[in-house]
Image (cartoon, rainbow, N blue to C red):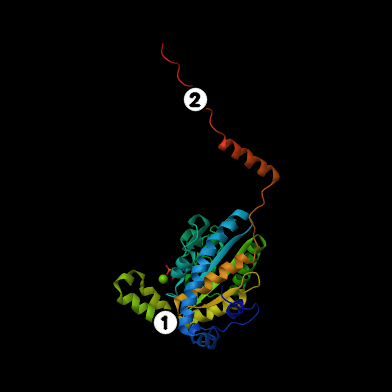
Amino acid sequence: MINPKLLKQFIVEPGTEVDLKRYPTDWMESDEAKELGKGVIKERAAQVLEENRKELDATQELLYASDSYSVLLIFQAMDAAGKDGTIRHVMSGVNPQGCQVFSFKKPSTEELDHNFLWRYMKSLPERGRIGIFNRSYYEDVLVVKVHPEWLGPGQPAKPDKSFWEKRYEDINNFEKHLTRNGTIVLKFFLHLSKDEQKKRFLERLTNPAKHWKFSEADLAEREHWKEYQKAFEDAFTATSTKRAPWHIIPADRKYIARAMVADIIVSAIRDLGLEYPKTSPQKVKALAAARARLEKKPTPAKPDEPHL
Ligand code: AMP
Ligand code: MG
């Protein structure tokens, strides 16, 4: 387990104005990390991920058995920040029946014909399950804030400040509704530096096994880097709440991001203090009867009548 005091610095305290430059993208460069030593951290990160992966499987089973909560994990980031890899690594030990991943792309015409939360509402996790949103309703205050022309029909051509404020308010109300009704909401921003993104794009261009990951559209979005950072800051400032906080995870090193995310998820579920449902006296009786029936020796078959 990672020291919760260490992780606290990555949670956006509700009501604070977020300046992303103040959050590290490479935690290894921090004084704390230098003190511990890089070799030690890399080894510890692998251990933490492994421990949490195992615990997450057991925790999800308990979540299912106790049938009172669901967990919604939200991942947002710039391209190549490692959302897919983090989801794959962190969730790799969990029973596939206990979790579900939804990746949200450009909305369809049908989706654009509804309110902006509609497509996400339909994908919320059932009680007992972990739902993962790879991109989410936050795109509706991020990518479309940078490109308002993608807002779709029925929306203002030039949305003003109050348009976005209303969306933040809708999101906060939506998350309030979810958390009041038994959904734990954890939000992760994988915070990548522009230099590291360039390295990862170059790797995608160079390594034939990674060519498929490269999209020219990603380069066009990179040119809007500053606008995206500003849109992220505005969104985190407006929507980090006690009930659904934002975590700004340093993502320049994948192993650090994965270990931190896994640890935060496991701790949040553990904090619910879930227990397996108690067996009622009637059920104990019924179980004893079932056992007796199962263990009862079969009456031996009568031997065949001898032929006369
Ligand atoms: P990827 O996750 O890399 O496959 O890319 C999905 C693309 O869909 C990204 O460029 C997102 O910005 C875009 N996208 C996701 N949600 C929305 C949305 N609500 N409106 C417009 N574009 C979106
Ligand atoms: Mg992409």
Quadrant assignment, res 264: bottom right
Mark 2 secondary-structure assignment: loop
Q: Residue 51 location in percent, x, y?
A: 52, 68
Q: Determine whether 121 is above or below 261 in the image.
A: above
Name the kind of residue labelled 1 in the image: Glu
Q: Residue 122 location in percent, x, y?
A: 54, 57
Query: Of 89 and 232, which appears nearest the observer?
Result: 89
Specify few, some or many for label 1: CA neighbours under 10 Å numbering under 14, 14-19, or 20 or more.
some
Q: Name the mark on residue 196.
A: 1
Query: Of 111 and 296, which appears nearest the observer?
Result: 296
Q: Residue 80 location in percent, x, y?
A: 42, 75
Residue furthest out toward the top = 308
* Left or right side of 94 for 166: right
Residue lying at 67% horizontally and 62% vertically, measured from the top left: 180
Of the numbered discs 1 and 2, the one sitting upstream in the chain is 1
Query: Of 8 and 112, which appears nearest the observer?
Result: 8
Provide the residue designation for mark 2: 301
Q: Residue 125 location in percent, x, y?
A: 56, 58
Q: Distance between the residues labelled 1 and 2?
A: 76 Å
Q: Quarter of the image containing the N terminus?
A: bottom right
